[in-house]
Amino acid sequence: MVLLPAFGYLPVLGGNTFHLEAWQDLWARAGLGHSVWLSYASGLITTLVALFIVVLFLAASQGTWIDRTIRRMVSPLLAIPHAAVAFGLAFLIAPSGLLVRWVSPGLTGWERPPDLLIINDPSGLALMAGLILKEVPFLLLMSLAALPQLRPDSRVVLARSLGYAPGIAWLKCVFPALYPLIRLPVYAVIAYATSVVDMALILGPTLPPTLSVSILNWFNDPDLSRRFMASAGAVLQLGVTLAALLSWWIGEQAVKCLSQRWLTNGARSSGSTAIAVGGRALLITVTLLAISALFGLALFSVAGFWRFPDALPGTFTLDHWQRILPSVATPLINTLSVGLTATLIACVLVVATLEHAARHHLAARRVQWLLYLPLIVPQVAFLFGLVVAAESIAIRPQHALVVATHLLFVIPYLYLSLSEAYRRLDPRWGQVALSLGVSPWRAFWQVRLPLLLAPLLTACAVSLAVSIGQYLPTLLLGGGRVPTITTEAVAMASGGNRRLVAVLALLQALLPFIGFSLALLIPRFVWAKRRQMRGAA
Amino acid sequence: MKPRATLAAAVATVMLSLALPVAAAPAPGDWDAVLDAAEGQTVYWNAWAGEERTNAYISWVAEQVDALYGVELVHVKLGDTSEAVSRVLAEKQAGNDDQGSVDMIWINGENFAAMKANELLFGPWADSLPNYALTDPDNTPAVRYDWTIPVDGLESPWSSSQVVFYYDTALVEDHPDNMPALLEWAAQHPGEFTYPQVPNFLGNAFITQALLELSDTTDLFYKPMQEEDFDAATAPLWEFLDQLHPHLWRSGRAFPSNSADLRSLMSDSEISIALSFSTTEASGAIANYELPKTVRSYVHDSGMIGNMSFMAIPYNAQHKAGAMVVANYLMSPEAQAEKQDPAVWGSNTVLSMKMLSPDERALFDGIDLGIATLPPDELGEVLGQPHPSWVDAIVEAWQERYVN
């Protein structure tokens, strides 16, 4: 459905023949090369930096109360929607933003904001910073969910008994085992960062914007013939994402080769102080930035008029909350019912698939990549085809159709969050249970599933957050029949009243926040007497 | 994939069995039949929803049409009108010609031109509405031509708007009155003016305004563009923009994305002069705590670009009768006066005062326009939107020149 219009075929707009005009138009676009480069580079750099921060922190982390506190502060950040983080960050670091306000005019002497290009900078630094704020919590959570089955503590203890400094011990003995487990989430981050739209709209460069934003603009162009070029752009976007993934894969191989010597060189402590300090400092910076961004949003949601360079709004008011709250009940209920239904269905399907594979010792199939396709093809491009497909078989917009569409995005995330943890679960647990004479079902319910409780709940929380974040699928497939808190928030964001946007963004963050909190708390409650089973949070 | 296909087929079967028989829409001219058919219908109105005051007004309309006509009105909140166009396009592609999910769209200009050209609209119906005469269509070309494209009864007028500038009197002593003066002012106050990035509609309006102001004769812009005229006709515009851009906010290296962004820049004192497509924007934003109380509006001496926005009904809408009843109510003096009140929304009426009864006129006379809103007699001449082919061409050329 993306491919046909890209090659000139879309009968409803009079495109009845195949040709390459759309591609010629696309190549002729001003700034196309720059757009492509921005998408490619920002995807790779973001992932690299985010992974670096997470790994360094995990290496530095000693399980002290400080480390545990930092971890607990990071996880809820995952609940804040991308657009909300972007809004918050933009307001934090802009020349007229919160940080400058706090030091002006006292330290700077600025009565008017300086004319500096920070947000929307041509090289996309602000966009990358925003993405890193969101991807660090995601990768950290994925790592924490995968870690317990590696029994990192005993590995580190062993290495330390051989004289390795703690950070080095972790990097050399745990990380090489951890990386394969979080590889799929890392790939998802690359795919996401190369094709992100909402954050790029707010923080990204504009002259030209990233490829994904350009595609959205062409699809939204009133001139409907632009859609041919937009479809060609979507195919190109897929190519850019694949190129980024391929580059990363090549990088992986290179690191694998080059690090062999370092892993076995026997050096026990060089760099360990840097790891201990840097790992914590970087993560704390990320966390503080995100929390300040959130604080800025909260401040705006109750702000009256707020002139630069006042550090705080001149007046406070509950007007904004009072105007929004009466109308959010239905959207909140819709959001929750769609999210929970989609998560539940996805959970059953994914666990059934994984359990089936585990029982019959099936290797991951090659068709798996199909599952991930919805994550790497720009939504705006293939949703149109989906609407056509649903309409062709006379499925009218409704609740169930929205749930079905959300499944396209929820299943891959749930699968990639859970599959490695599931596959690597020591099969001997199940074998012991079977040898004691229970049925495979009972072994599954009473042994394997409880062992996987922490990663399963985390995966469900991620899925719920993914479902809650969907805008275009909900709007286009739901035909406006299923308003959710996200469709309300995005529509309101297009009007740009920062105070009302802040209210909706905070509301939008509420549900996933509850989801993540439950995912962390339930294992602690259920396994109150079994510390090792609680997951690593 | 196979189980999923089976599931989809099963769902499809259930849905088909549930599908209601389609009632043919009554002829727009037979108003009583339209009212009868409309009763009990649910109308899905797809409208941009970025402004809370607009949304609140639409909720008010929903209460009224429910009470008056038994029509249930649902506001489908959009971030961009093209999302509704996508939906209709997909339905047409799939052959859903009578059970479309979009009943009514808030639309104008290029989106209207595109939908009309691709035969995605129902009609003619708009000139059959009882309240249509109140717009005095014979003497008001703006309700018959949407960006020079003949409306042909395919959409009914809803709101009129005009570009105005607004500025902070605490920061600017004398505001400029024309484009060359704006350039001079910007050179003296670097970084304190900007406009939304083309192709945002307000950005397009700014460069169109500049084109009209800087050209000696503007007649040719109201006819379809001839390729050979383009370079000569637009040369003054590019000369002006080339000179202006280095003096803009961020030296023209970045532009705000839309009117809301622009308003935020004013709110943060980053810039001192901005523009809007709503004459009451400044007053509304002051009431919303978004702008300082010292902000006021002004217009250029030569007049400012204005246009109207409309209601259109897609060709395959399921509830056409209901949509017509709502569109007609939206043009009623009662609904138009409520809309014009800045305390509610502050969007200008499309009705012609001389067509109203004294009682109806009184509804409008009592409205307090707000502290930063220019009274109607100070808004000056309304310049018509050029033909879309011209706007498309200068938008395209702008991107060629300034995106790299």
Image (cartoon, coloured by chain):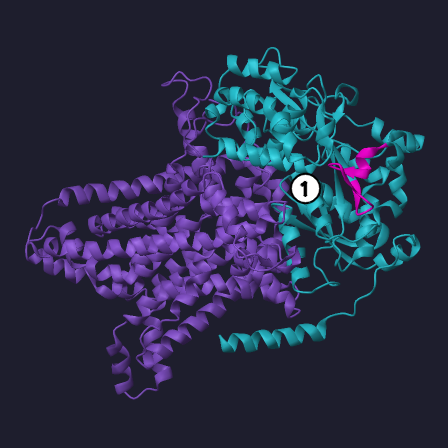
A107 with respect to B16 (left or right)? left
Q: Nearer the viewer, residue A172 or B386?
A: B386
Q: Nearer the viewer, residue B25 or B225?
A: B225
Residue located at (21% from left, 64% from top): A151
Q: Nearer the viewer, residue B148 or A169?
A: B148
Q: Residue furthest top?
A: B173
Q: Measuring from the top left, give residue A147's x and y in whole percent.
A: 26, 61
Q: Measuring from the top left, give residue B281's x and y in whole percent.
A: 66, 29
Q: Which residue is mark 1?
A: B110
Element at label 1: helix
Residue A33 falls in image quadrant: top left
Regarding residue B347, the answer to whether it shows in the image is no
Residue located at (53% from left, 57% from top): A7
The residue range painted magenta reads B140-157
Q: Chain of mark 1?
A: B
Residue located at (64% from left, 32% from top): B228
A111 w.r.t. A70: above or below: above
B311 with respect to A250 (left or right)? right
Q: Measuring from the top left, give residue A348's x and y in whole percent.
A: 45, 72
Image quadrant holding the N terminus of chain A, namely: bottom right
Would you call the spot at circle 1 few (<14 residues within 10 Å), some (14-19), or many (20 or more)?
many
Colour assigned to chain B in the rendering is: cyan
The kind of residue on which mark 1 rests is Glu
Regarding residue B316, the answer to whether it shows in the image is yes
Q: Is residue A443 magenta?
A: no
A422 w.r.t. B38: above or below: below
Colour assigned to chain A in the rendering is: purple
